[in-house]
Amino acid sequence: LIKNDELSADKRREYLEIARKHTKRLGELIGDLFELSKLDSASIHPTVEAFSLAELLHDIVHEYELDAQRRDVKLSIEAPNDAAIVYADIGLMQRVLENLIRNALKFTPPGGRIDIRLDKRPDAVLVAIEDTGCGIAEEDLEHVFDRFYRAENATQSGSNNAGLGLAIVRKILDLHGSRISVTSQVDRGTCFEFDLPTQAAA
């Protein structure tokens, strides 16, 4: 605004793009903060129903395929339809899967891959999201679900993640009585795992 009369059309567009980028990021951060606040206050109550986790997963992965292609990252799913009926809140599970896949994309370099697997257990379906990204140092593993926590490798990678996505994931899974675990090796990749009950077990 101060230099408006002096700016060329190209320079003005450059500044507007910067403003738009930061405004979008601020909107996402505020949305995450509101969501985490609701989860903390127990004002969100899961609407539990039986649904195909494999079908939901395929829909979500389809949304991220173009972004993955741009990043030269391969997304793969191993999810047999007949082994993936779970009992949970479908909207909240969509949020969990989106956050985990988006997180994996942020930290997986070009040429890498993200493998998503569903594995049927006697009374649950195990979900595993594994990437070949930068990995997480052992001393950071116990803190990755803490809000606003950013590991050193996240800072070095240039991510502007505020550290709320994984905190939201854990809170949602807590509401479903499910625990999420993480294993990782620096420069080799990370794997997040959690399970959801089948309809018969709910």
Image (cartoon, rainbow, N blue to C red):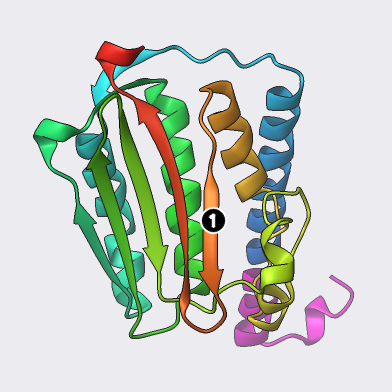
- Vertically, is 176 above or below 166? above
Work out whether residue 9 or residue 135 is closer to the camera in this orientation and state it. 135
Q: Quadrant of the N terminus?
A: bottom right
Q: Residue furthest front?
A: 122
Question: Which residue occupies 53% across, 43% down?
Answer: 180
Q: Is residue 19 visible?
A: no
Question: Which percent across, then down, holds residue 40?
Answer: 75, 25
In the picture of the structure, the residue carrying the numbered disc 1 is 182
Q: Quadrant of the C terminus?
A: top left
Work out whether residue 46 or residue 188 is closer to the camera in this orientation and state it. 188
> What stretch of residues is rendered in magenta?
1-19
Work out whether residue 138 or residue 163 is closer to the camera in this orientation and state it. 138
Left or right: residue 3 versus residue 103 is right
Question: Which residue occupies 80% across, 87% down?
Answer: 6
Question: Which residue occupies 64% across, 72% down?
Answer: 159
Left or right: residue 67 versus residue 14 is left
* Displayed quadrant of residue 175: top right
- Vertically, is 170 above or below 88? below
Question: Which percent across, then down, holds residue 68?
Answer: 33, 69
